[in-house]
Structure formats: C-alpha cells, structure tokens
Amino acid sequence: MTAVVEVSRLTKSYRDVTAVDDVSFAIEAGKIYGLLGRNGAGKTTLMQMITAQAFPTIGELRVFGESPFENNRVLSRICFIKESQKYPDNYRVADVLDLCSDLFPNWDRDFADRLVEAFRLPPKRQMRKLSRGMLSSVGIVAGLASRAPLTIFDEPYLGLDAASRSLFYELLVEDYAEHPRTVILSTHLIDEVSRILEHVIVINDGRVLIDEETDSLRNRAFTVSGATADVEAFAKGKTVLHRETLGGLASAIVVGNPGADDRQLARSLRLELDNVPLQQLIVHLTSRKSYGKEAKA
Amino acid sequence: MEFMVDDSRPIFVQIAERIEDDIVEGRLPEESQVPSTNQFASFYRINPATAAKGVNLLVDQGILYKKRGIGMFVAPGAKARLMDKRKERFFEQYVMTMLREAEKLGITVNQLTEMIQKGANHR
C-alpha cells in the first residue's frame, strides 16, 4: 500500500500549548479515513500541517512522498474543506465554483452543477448572503467535485440539516466508488459517518489514541450487565472502560472480544452481553485518560 | 428499517449475513448474480471496501464465486450448506435460549413441549 500522508513524530507547539504531541501515522491511498476526537484534541492543527497551512515544530511530514510546503505538485492534489472558510466579499456561489475549476485539475463541472442542484444552492447569490447551512453546502460541493486525490473535510456541515448530511454521505460513497481517492473526514458526528469510514484515527490530547480499521474497532469492547456483584465478578481481571449502576444493577463496558469462556461465565451468572456502538466506545476511550497509557503498553 | 446496519458489530459480517439470508430465503437463487460491491455500498451507504470484504468472506467459504469480468454469483449447493450451518446454530440460538428463559419463568420442560405442540397446531 502506498501512503499518501506519512507523519512521523510530528509535534506542534504554540507558546505554552502542545497542540500535536509526537504523532506518527500513515494515510494509505484510496481509503476513507475518519479523524476523530474531542474539541481541542489537535485534529485541526494536524490537518493544517498536512495542507501546509501551519509549520510543524518538530517531526517529519510527507504528502504524496514530498514536503507539502510551498510545493505546488503536492498542493494541487489536495482539497481542504474547512468549517471556517472565508470568501472574498462580492463572490457569488458561481464565482467560487469557477475559482475551484481553476484550482483543481480534476474538477468535474457537470458533477458540480448536479451537486448545486441537489443541495438547492442559488448560483447567483452572494456568498455573504448565504445561510450557515448553505455555506457548508458550497464547501461540500467544492470538496466532492474537486475529485482531488487527497480530499479533507474538517467538520464540513455546520448548520446543515439531517437530510442534507444524509445526501452528502450518499453522494460521497457513490462518487468515491466510481472515482476512488483518499478522503479524510474529521467530525463529531461519529454515529452518522462511521459506516462509510474504512479506517479511524482518534486523536486525544494531541496524541494518537486509536489507529485502526473501523470494523475491527467494532470488536474492541462489549457491555456486560446484570446484578452488581455478578458484573463485578465477571469484570474481575478485565479492563473496564466505564461502569454504571442503578440500584442493585450494574453495567460495565469491558475491553476485548468475549470468548467462549466469557460467554459461559456470563450465562451461569445470568448476565447479558451486548455490543458497544462505535460512538459510545470512542466517547469512553477519549474521556478516560489512563486508557491511552494502557493501549500503548 | 430492515436495511439499516448496526454500528456495534463489524459491518462486513452484517453484509455477509444479509447475503446469506437472501440465499436461504430464495431471493438469491443458486447461479444468480449478486449485486456489485458498489451497489451494496450505495444501498447501505457503507464504504465499498467494507462491502467487498463481506462479499469476499462468502467467496472464501465457497458460498459465492467469481466470474472474471462479470461479477459474483451464488455457488451451486450454497443454499443447502448455509441451511446446515444454520441448523447447527438453531440449537444454541433458539432452543437453549428458550430453555433458559422458560426456567426463569418457572415453565417446566413438559409445559414447554405442550406449548410447542400447541403452536404447531395453530399454524
């Protein structure tokens, strides 16, 4: 597999804050990645470095095998859609799309026109007169129609309603299937996007907490519930991510995949075993500091 | 909705199970063509690589086979083999689960047998 992005021991420090702390990972070509994590985890700083908008303090960064800084061979192959994108004051939607067709060698004008219609964007309206959701839609149209070999969406859907988000996922999957490329999707809406992600990188406190195939992550933990004493007996010696009790009942999220022994034990104790949805797993992993240490050991 | 995927289990496994269901229930007859991975991907809105992994799982088990340049097809004998596999699982999945639930409710094995008979007569 060829790596589109290779990051090695990358660190970005501001005066008294280390936003990205000794991070290493590789983004392989032709996959859809999720870059997930809580606010302030360092995701945006990472994406800014990958797209040459911020310099690393220490560490190595290669994009398409080269340094991205002031390197048009690399930058012409990247499309970075960010939530805070600013546009010149008098630009209309159509002007933004014209600019995109100059910037992105793979720009597909027909596709862009179809997307404008699908998202019900008014081409002649000025950008500054668009609603928040419409602004996000323009970003999505640009990101999809650019067909850039590396397309990065950073929280692309502020203000977008559920129907438009769903349309975005649908169009992304369809177009990606026909025109495979590398996509990085950074978002909080894990529940909504997880099934289109092939690989997940979770950043926590500036470090990589998880770098794993999405489907294998779905097997990382399970919930056990029943009488408190029995749940405790079952969880003994296992890594527990989270515990909840209600009266005499308890449930615990246990790391691992239940084996035949675990199932047998659970049956004899009359405990229920359940799967943990990805979003819940990531929430618990990123709200527990010690897990990072255990995971690294 | 039946076509939703469950986010707490590997999706490629769920795709393989859906195809198995379709074969067992006759919606995908033997020697018929299976939808392409891109069709699965856009129908379930999942990653095409994940859909391909589910399909390949069944290819590895000999349930599906590939016709070069055309696509994936249901192998001859696939239905019978899947049904055998399901019969093995039936005991644990339904019989044992039912017995445990019956025990909780104080239903004896004899009462249970009667209930099964009654249910069969009602069909």
Image: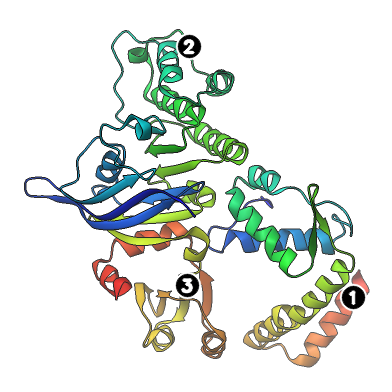
Q: Is residue A173 left or right of residue A139?
A: right
Asked if badges 3 and 1 are on one and the same chain, I answer: no
Does residue A10 appear in this view? yes
In front: mark 3 or mark 1? 3
Residue at the spot 81% in from the left edge and 47% down from the top edge: B70
Q: What separation in Å lies between label 3 and label 1 (alpha carbons)?
A: 37 Å
Q: Which amino acid lies under the numbered mark 2 shown in the image of this protein?
A: Pro
- Residue A202: which quarter of the image? bottom left
Q: Which residue carries the number 2 mark?
A: A123
Q: Are marks 3 and 1 in contact (CB under 8 Å)?
A: no
Give the answer, above or below, for where A267 lies relative to A163: below
Q: Nearer the viewer, residue A226 or B17?
A: B17
Q: Say whether disc 2 or disc 3 marks the residue closer to the N-terminus.
A: 2
Label 3 marks a residue whose chain is A
In front: mark 2 or mark 3? 2
- Residue B113: which quarter of the image? bottom right
- Horizontal and vertical percent position of residue A139: 41, 27
Judge the density around disc 3: few (<14), some (14-19), many (≥20) Cα neighbours within 10 Å: many
Residue at the spot 29% in from the left edge and 13% down from the top edge: A88
Q: Nearer the viewer, residue A54 or B105?
A: A54
Q: What separation in Å lies between label 2 and label 3 (alpha carbons)?
A: 49 Å
Give the answer, above or below, for where B13 lies relative to A155: below
Q: Secondary structure at mark 2?
A: loop
Q: Secondary structure at mark 1?
A: helix
Q: Which amino acid lies under the numbered mark 1 shown in the image of this protein?
A: Ala
Q: Which residue carries the number 3 mark?
A: A222
- Horizontal and vertical percent position of residue B7: 54, 58
Q: Are marks 1 and 2 in contact (CB under 8 Å)?
A: no
Residue at the spot 78% in from the left edge and 86% down from the top edge: B112
Give the answer, above or below, for where A181 lies relative to A210: above
Q: Which residue carries the number 1 mark?
A: B120
